[in-house]
Amino acid sequence: MKHLLTVVLLAFSLNGFAQQKPLEWHTDVKKAIDVSIENGKPLLFFFTGSDWCGWCKRLQKEVFFKPEFATWANKNVVLVELDFPRRTKLSAELQKQNRELGQMFGVRGYPTIWFVTPEIQESRKINFQKLGKQGYVAGGPKAWIAGADKYIKPKK
């Protein structure tokens, strides 16, 4: 009986992990804007140096790779990675997009996270309403999400 209970509990816990929707990190901002407008969720711009930035790697390990973050992100934001690698080669188009957004948001260090809402003007020009910015926050997903929730209206 004890073994049966263990097997049942294990099955339920594995089922919970299997139902967790994987995170989708966009790199094409135009596509991410479409998703944001369609779903009514703000964009989370993650400015990173993926292959050299120690604090970026730490933020990913301590927050972004955790199930609590995945649950929160899937409910509340559209994720966009804007990478500035040193060893990995990006397409010229992607480099240009990331550089222009980095300049637009005054990014001077990594990781920098901006929460923004895209607004399409009549001229089809896109403006970003800045909701707030955040970087690395000690304390894991709970502390990081508490900071992020100050800028967005989280869905319960």
Image (cartoon, helix red, strand yellow):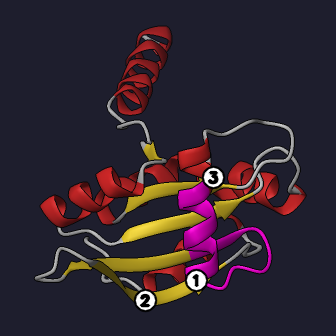
Residue 58 is marked as none
Q: Amino acid at mark 3?
A: Gln
- The answer to whether residue 153 is above or below residue 64 is below
- The answer to the question of whether label 3 and label 1 lie on touching residues, with beta carbons closer than 8 A, is no
Viewer-nearest residue: 105 or 20: 105
Which residue is found at the position 73% from the left and 68% from the top?
111
Binning the other alpha carbons within 10 Å of mark 3 as few (below 14), some (14 to 19) or many (20 upward) gives some
Span of residues in magenta:
96-113
- The answer to the question of whether label 1 and label 2 lie on touching residues, with beta carbons closer than 8 A, is yes
First in sequence: mark 2 vs mark 3? 3
Q: Nearer the viewer, mark 3 or mark 1?
A: 3
Which residue is found at the position 77% from the left and 69% from the top?
110
Binning the other alpha carbons within 10 Å of mark 2 as few (below 14), some (14 to 19) or many (20 upward) gives some
Q: Is residue 78 visible?
A: yes
- The answer to whether residue 130 is above or below residue 28 is below
Per the model, the C-alpha gap separating discs 3 and 1 is 15 Å
- Image quarter where the N terminus lies is top left
Q: Nearer the viewer, mark 2 or mark 3?
A: 3
Q: Where residue 86 appears, x then y in whole percent? A: 85, 47
Residue under label 3: 95
Residue under label 1: 105
Residue under label 2: 130
Q: Secondary structure at mark 2?
A: strand
- The answer to whether residue 101 is above or below residue 12 is below
